[in-house]
Image (cartoon, rainbow, N blue to C red):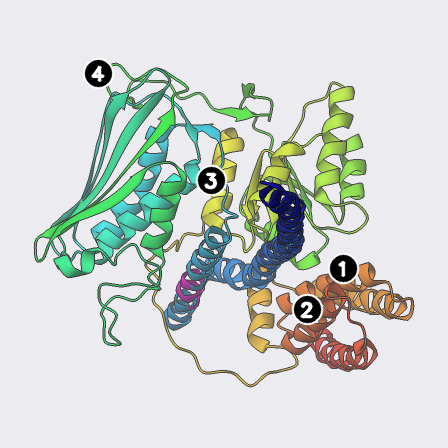
Amino acid sequence: MNNSSNREQNTGPGSAHSGENEQDKRLTELESMVTLLEMENRHLRKIARQADSANKAKSDFLAMISHEIRTPMNGVIGITELLLDTELQSRQRYFAELILGSARNLLTLINSLLDFSKIEANKMVLEEEQFSLTELLGEIMALYEVSGRQKGLFIHADIDRRLAGSYRGDSYRIRQILVNLLGNAIKFTDRGGVGLTVRLEERGAEEDRLRFEVADTGLGIVPEKLDKLFLPFSQVDSSTTRRHGGTGLGLSICSRLVELMGGHIDVESTPGEGSTFWFVISMPRVGEGRDEEAEPDGPEGAEAVAAVRDGTGETRPDSREGAAILIVDDDDTNRVLLEQSFRNNDVRLSMASNGREAVEVCRDRDFDLIFMDCQMPVMDGFEAAVSINEMLRSARRKRPVIIALTADVTDSTRRRCREVGMDDYLIKPLDFSELQRVLDNWLTGYGLRVTPRHRLAAGSGTETEAGAQQEEVIHRGSIEKLRQNIGDIRPVITVFLSTMRTRLDELEQAIAGRDIKTIQRTAHTLKGSSSQFGAGELSRLCQEAENMARNNNLQQIEPLFRKITRAADQVAFFLHEQLD
């Protein structure tokens, strides 16, 4: 009995001590796990910061590359448009049309790549605006009736009469989807026709579910290829001998855009009989559906009343006095391009080279419309738009329509244009059909026409391969284009030489003071003006200087400036010969 008690007394404390050791061990393990988790969390936060930084860098790159690619193309497409509206020999006109067609194809490719990159970076943001779907469909069909007739195809549309008067959504992206589907249908159809059908599938309390179909009688698609159609860079015929070109991005972009709209896209096809591409999306209504018994709208029997929008939603009667237009751009060549676009119209044109000048001009004069470049020194277009609107509102004067001019097509820039009170925008390089759309929309009473007579149907350009030309100080073809567009080019050359010398002095002072912003801005402006004159080498060197400043890397800026100076001297010598 006593022995048993002794054993219990001896083992009791030992067991307690063992339990305490076990708890300490578990506590140590838990502390180690907590430490590991904290380290892992710090690592994950670091990765998240790096990912955010990479996404921002990608977004900045998209904005930069969009601007840089489109700016030089402004000269290519715009000047070619003007060239084709002059008296040309048939052989010259043929070559110029090939240039314009190739430039448009290149611009389409650039747009597709930029859209695809934005989608991949999750930077594609849909706009929410009120628009008329029936008007949008009418514009698109009018466009493709032309290209359809050229191939001998029957182009038709069947639009549900119950569609609402207006919807809220991204009309630009809906247009992009339909243009891609209709363009593909016409491209792959040699006989028969192409039809667009739009149906109201379901009417909800506040929104409509709509089904869009594009049907053709073309080649059709074999079943094993259908699941690859909406993949990026994928084509039904990917061989090097395929009849129809393309990047294979169009349908992929359409698919992603429809998904962003909360819809679905698909295709039904029979080889040799044709294909039907369809998508379904829902959009909020802004107006009631049209009466099924109503007669179609049309101008027959109705008296046309010309009116001009003044930017406030009101209209005023047509005036016989020419429209007052202000062109604001810091680049002389861009101002000349727009000025020449109106040369056959009765307009009153004024010019300003920066936002502050524009504000001062508007203080003394009223304008119907202002073309406002967004990126300018002294005062940019955004700040100028705000100042002009506030000044005129305080003085109870009529507010002009303000059209943004920008090479940046990012959604953030579009939103900022609207936020500062701009009414519409034009993308550089300038598309004459878009310029005409703006004039038709905002200055309807003046009958302004800037679309060249030769106007090619969209997408009908021919792609050609051109050998690389030996780089010249000045491309003589560019000088000849300017001479044909504006006649006596000596005043323009004089202005360019004077401003070029001023820009070089500004650039030299900025380099000496390591003023990065001024280096970037001045090099950018000199690059643009020199490229319009065909000074390829000078333009390229200025681009290098702009990039150095943007990347905050000025180690080689002095040797580069010496190259810029030599190239500028060569350009000046060449242009002085033209003056003589």
Q: Residue under circle 4?
A: 292
Which amino acid type is shown beneath numbered disc 1? Arg
Q: Is residue 432 above or below residue 534?
A: above
Element type where label 2 sits in the image: helix
- Measuring from the top left, give residue 556's x and y in whole percent: 79, 79
- The question of residue 445 being in magenta is answered with no
**Picture residue at 53% right of the left edge, 64% below the top:** 76
The disc, 3 or 4, on the residue closer to the chain's N-terminal end is: 4
Which amino acid type is shown beneath numbered disc 2? Ser
Tell me where the magenta segment starts and ends, as one range.
99-105
Q: Residue under circle 3?
A: 437
Per the model, the C-alpha gap separating discs 3 and 2 is 29 Å
575, 195: nearer the viewer: 195
Query: Magenta residues: mostly which secondary structure?
Result: helix
The disc, 3 or 2, on the residue closer to the chain's N-terminal end is: 3
Whether pointer 2 and pointer 1 mark residues with C-beta atoms closer than 8 Å, the reply is: no
The disc, 4 or 2, on the residue closer to the chain's N-terminal end is: 4
The disc, 4 or 1, on the residue closer to the chain's N-terminal end is: 4
211, 171: nearer the viewer: 211
Whether pointer 4 and pointer 1 mark residues with C-beta atoms closer than 8 Å, the reply is: no
Which amino acid type is shown beneath numbered disc 3? Arg
Q: Residue under circle 1?
A: 521
Q: Is residue 528 above or below residue 262?
A: below
